[in-house]
Amino acid sequence: MTSIEVHELTKDYGPVRAVDHLTFSVRPGRVTGFLGPNGAGKSTTMRLALGLARPSAGSATIGGRQYSALDNPLRRVGALLDVQAAHGSRTARKHLRVLAASNGIADSRVEEALDEAGLTEVGGRRIKTFSLGMRQRLGIAAALLGEPEVVMLDEPSNGLDPEGIVWIRELMRRLAREGRTVLVSSHLMNETSSFADHLIVLGRGRLLADLPIGQFLSSRNRPGVRLRTTEAFRLRDALVRRGYTPVEDEGGDWTIEGAHVEEIGAIAAGEGIPLVELTQMRVTLEEAYLDLTASETQFAASTTLPDQPVSPKEA
């Protein structure tokens, strides 16, 4: 099977370094989530791997070869980078037929790809009439047309409705189960956590993390317990005596940072205090990602509003 190998990959645009000495591998048989803030270099890295831009230094190869050196590249690598790339005046079916003919792919694969993407009924419509979600489906159909070993998708969930999001999630999992190499760039953390086996995280063009998703989450996790009890003050006093600092929220739940359920459960049982709920708090992918990339975000909006003038009626 085929891997994507990135070694010391660097790309400069004048004085701006978009990709900074990146080294990582994308392996077959798993879905690799490609994460990073806007401007982190994800799309540039994908373009470099696909030969759409030349690196300033280093290399990005697929199966040990440059993309430009691949025979019938659509049979080796399927990619979705820009859903607007298809000619709007062509029909979806014609667009796929042109790609198939230019890459030595049987015309029968066009109908299979349309069906797989859920576009059979609209295959005769012009692409300029398609919604964003339909264009996404067509781009994915084009990426899968040659039944490639490597699939690279940039924000494939954009514009998809809930059914489409479930479809693309299951599709990526199936491709990985078939032993293919799947690299997916996304800003949707909750969605990424539902399909990714491995994560590569960039920040300002540099590699920040290259880990299985479970290891990534555990590396950013901080222990804590959330509970609810009918005897909150008794439990609070018992916890304080043992050095814990329980905090109550507005809903009546208590949070104890730095604790584990086994410890808190044992204390409650020893004091004869009933617990209605006892949960180990776990970091989400979004929380772990934001914690890692907080200092690497190039474009960040202010979280505070400027002072507003007070009208005479409000004064």
Image (cartoon, helix red, strand yellow):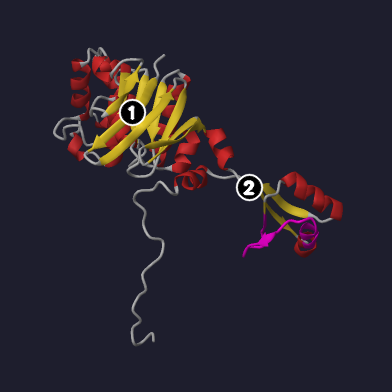
Q: Amino acid at mark 1?
A: Leu
Left or right: 235 as drawn, with respect to 73: right
- The quadrant the C terminus occupies is bottom left
- The quadrant the N terminus occupies is top left
The residue identified by callout 1 is: 9
Would you place residue 183 above or below residue 74 in this image?
Answer: below
Can residue 17 be seen here? yes
| Relative image position of residue 51 (x, y in whole percent) | 25, 24
| Relative image position of residue 285 (x, y in whole percent) | 51, 42
Q: Residue at x 70, y 54 (%)?
A: 227
Q: Is residue 182 magenta?
A: no
The image quarter in which residue 111 lies:
top left
Residue 281, numbered label: 2
- Region of the chain picked out in magenta, as a range: 237-256
Q: Amino acid at mark 2?
A: Met
Q: Nearer the viewer, residue 262 or 299?
A: 299
